[in-house]
Amino acid sequence: MFDPKKLLNDLLGSQIPGTGSTVRDKGGQAMQMAKDNPLAAGALAAVLLGTGAGRQVTGTAVKLGGLAVVGGLAYKAYQNYKNGKAPAETQVAGEPELLPPPADTSFHPSQAPQGEDEFTLTLVRAMISAAKADGHIDDDERQKIAGKLSLAGIDSDAEKFLMSELERPLDLDTLVAGAQTDAQKLELYTASRLAIDPNTRAERGYLDLLAGRLSLPDALLDHVEATVSAAKVPAPGEQAPEVPGSGKATANSRW
């Protein structure tokens, strides 16, 4: 059995062989390497999710590791929401510090009722489902991905899992059911938003549908958007997106 946490780390911060940098640090470089020399690329995030356009997770978020990144961002968004801040207040100049979620909160991996590994797999499935939302991963693209995965430095079990998920029809019922607590629902949405930049109507529609199925308040979603955007840097030539929502959020007591 493969290590789900390592797989999530790879999706959020794969090492680019020979550079000492992560895919999300230098997304454009990773994609160019993949185009020029697929054998040397070996970057799982570049292969599966693509990082040549849009925005890339960087800085302290990458250094934490995948599970702590998702939990930390979701927790930070929830805290800002609960404290009544406006989303725009969370987007300050410079790289924001991101900490793992506190151990005594439901956002910490050790609090997962189904176990860390099982919930980590749910987060990976959420990222892949989001990546498929715009429909660009068709049969031809899956064949290309299959050819590159064997060169990406992952074990055969992880490769089989990824290909199975890529071929699986969208099943929101199963995905949503994988989040057993309110904190996990927010983490599942956060992981999905991390996987993509909703630049198409299909991607935005998918995130909206997912948020509705998870019963997440609009004001809280605005904080997730602001927090995730603050943890990413624009790719060359891209302008930072406008932060949605400007009013004060009203906290909710489910958490």
Image (cartoon, helix red, strand yellow):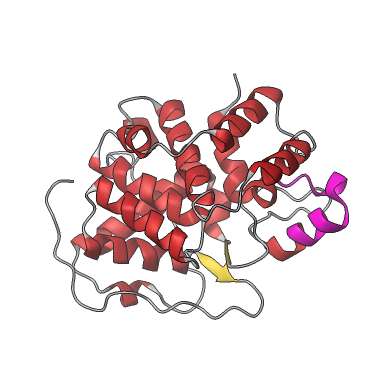
Quarter holding the N terminus?
A: top right
Q: Residue 162 at x, y = what percent? A: 60, 33
Q: Residue 181 at x, y = what percent? A: 25, 37
Q: Residue at x 80, y 48 (%)?
A: 17
Please indicate whether residue 52 sits to the left or right of residue 129 in the image.
right
Please indicate whether residue 47 sits to the left or right of residue 173 in the image.
right
* Main secondary structure of the magenta stretch: helix
**In which quarter of the view is residue 193 placed?**
bottom left
Q: Is residue 55 above or below residue 187?
A: below
Q: Residue at x 75, y 35 (%)?
A: 153
Total labels drawn: 0
Q: Residue 192 at x, y = what percent? A: 44, 50
Comparing 111 with 135, the one in front is 135
**Range drawn in magenta:** 31-43
Q: Residue at x 56, y 70 (%)?
A: 233
Outermost residue toward the top? 1
Asked if the stretch drawn in magenta spans residue 35, the answer is yes
Outermost residue toward the front? 139
Q: Residue at x 68, y 52 (%)?
A: 46
Residue 146 visible within the image: yes
Asked if the stretch drawn in magenta spans residue 246, the answer is no
Q: Is residue 207 above or below residue 166?
A: below
Q: Residue 151 at x, y = what percent? A: 80, 37
Q: Is residue 234 above or below residue 75?
A: below
Residue 26 visible within the image: no
